[in-house]
Image (tube, rainbow, N blue to C red):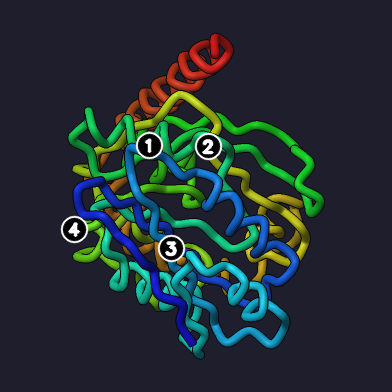
């Protein structure tokens, strides 16, 4: 089943939001409304939802949102669902937004301002972690993308509310063999040349509610074996070879790590100061 987007005006830039979801009736309405509330005279919004044939009331909720384009059919998991949405998207920029997360007011205006001025591949902001009732747990300050930050386990751009240049993304789709760490694998595969812009503002609410895949990471539970297996593959494929390429001497590899760790914390401090002034 589908609902078609109408009235796309090519004279204005189009931002596509892609949401892959499954049995998300509890939160999908909040997600959809948060996107619809971002409307602006400066750009147009296309929201695409790829539903994995939910057995709850997700489809009934989607049917009430006439400005949303959606498909409900079986897929091979979240990565496959997102890839379908990416290929359907008509915008020059595509945002990833999970069905249990939502955009904060004014987010797309910040992103639009950034993509007008910057020659980058990805744009993202700072994140608020929220609980099952949308109550804020804590604020998380993002930092500019560095391949080394991921390799050394320091930081990674948030996948929730991540805006990606469409032509780049469609040539570098998510790996459907990864169901838990598909974002980490994507960043590592894209490599060191990826150019980023971090906007000054909190743009997305990332929800932890006990049933999403990332809950074990947040609540400190025992990691599922599937996550451990995917992390092992990433370590073997990307991280170990890169660390070995830095130097064959452990002391130099450690110095390299310390340099990026210092760079990371300085960046956090700078963004903390800039955010405190808005």
Who comes first in sequence, dot 3 or dot 1? 3
Residue under pointer 2:
203
Between the C-alphas of marks 3 and 1, the distance is 15 Å
Which residue does the numbered mark 4 point to in the structure image? 167
Residue beneath label 1, please? 111
* Near-viewer residue (112 or 263): 112
Q: Is residue 200 above or below residue 273?
A: below
Displayed quadrant of residue 249: top left
Above or below, 2 relative to 255: below
Dot placed on the residue nearer the N-terminal end, 4 or 3: 3
Q: Are marks 3 and 2 in contact (CB under 8 Å)?
A: no
**Residue 162: image location, x then y, percent:** 42, 48
Judge left or right: residue 61 versus residue 1: right
- Residue 179 visible somewhere in the drawing: yes
Q: Of the two numbered discs 3 and 2 on the same chain, state the one appearing first in sequence.
A: 3
Crowd around label 4: few <14 · some 14–19 · many ≥20 (10 Å): some
Bin the neighbour count of mark 2 within 10 Å (Cα to Cα): few under 14, some 14-19, many 20 and up. Answer: many
- In this view, 167 is above or below 136: below
- Report the front residue among 106 and 250: 106
User: What residue is shown at x 37% (from left), y 38% (from top)?
Assistant: 41
């Amino acid at each position: 089943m589908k609902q078609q987007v109408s009235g796309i005006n090519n004279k204005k830039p189009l931002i596509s939001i892609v949401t892959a979801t499954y049995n998300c009736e509890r939160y999908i309405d909040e997600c959809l409304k948060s996107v619809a509330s971002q409307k602006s005279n400066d750009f147009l919004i296309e929201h695409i939802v790829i539903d994995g044939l939910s057995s709850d009331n997700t489809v009934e909720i989607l049917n009430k949102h006439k400005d949303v384009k959606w498909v409900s059919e079986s897929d091979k998991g979240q990565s496959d669902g997102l890839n379908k949405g990416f290929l359907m998207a008509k915008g020059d920029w595509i945002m990833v937004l999970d069905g249990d997360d939502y955009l904060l007011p004014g987010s797309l205006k910040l992103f639009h301002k950034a993509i007008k001025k910057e020659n980058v591949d990805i744009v993202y902001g700072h994140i608020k972690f929220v609980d099952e009732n949308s109550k804020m747990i804590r604020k998380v300050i993002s930092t500019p993308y560095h391949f080394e930050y991921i390799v050394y386990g320091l930081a990674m751009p948030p996948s929730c509310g991540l805006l990606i240049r469409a032509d780049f993304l469609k040539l570098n789709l998510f790996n459907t063999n990864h169901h838990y760490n598909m974002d980490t694998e994507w960043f590592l595969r894209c490599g060191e040349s990826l150019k980023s812009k971090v906007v000054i503002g909190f743009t997305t609410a990332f929800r932890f509610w006990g049933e999403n895949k990332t809950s074990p990471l947040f609540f400190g539970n025992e990691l599922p074996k599937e996550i451990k297996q995917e992390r092992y593959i990433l370590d073997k494929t990307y991280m170990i070879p890169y660390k070995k390429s830095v130097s064959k001497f452990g002391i130099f590899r450690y110095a390299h790590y310390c340099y990026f760790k210092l760079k990371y914390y300085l960046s956090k401090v700078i963004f903390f100061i800039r955010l405190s002034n808005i």
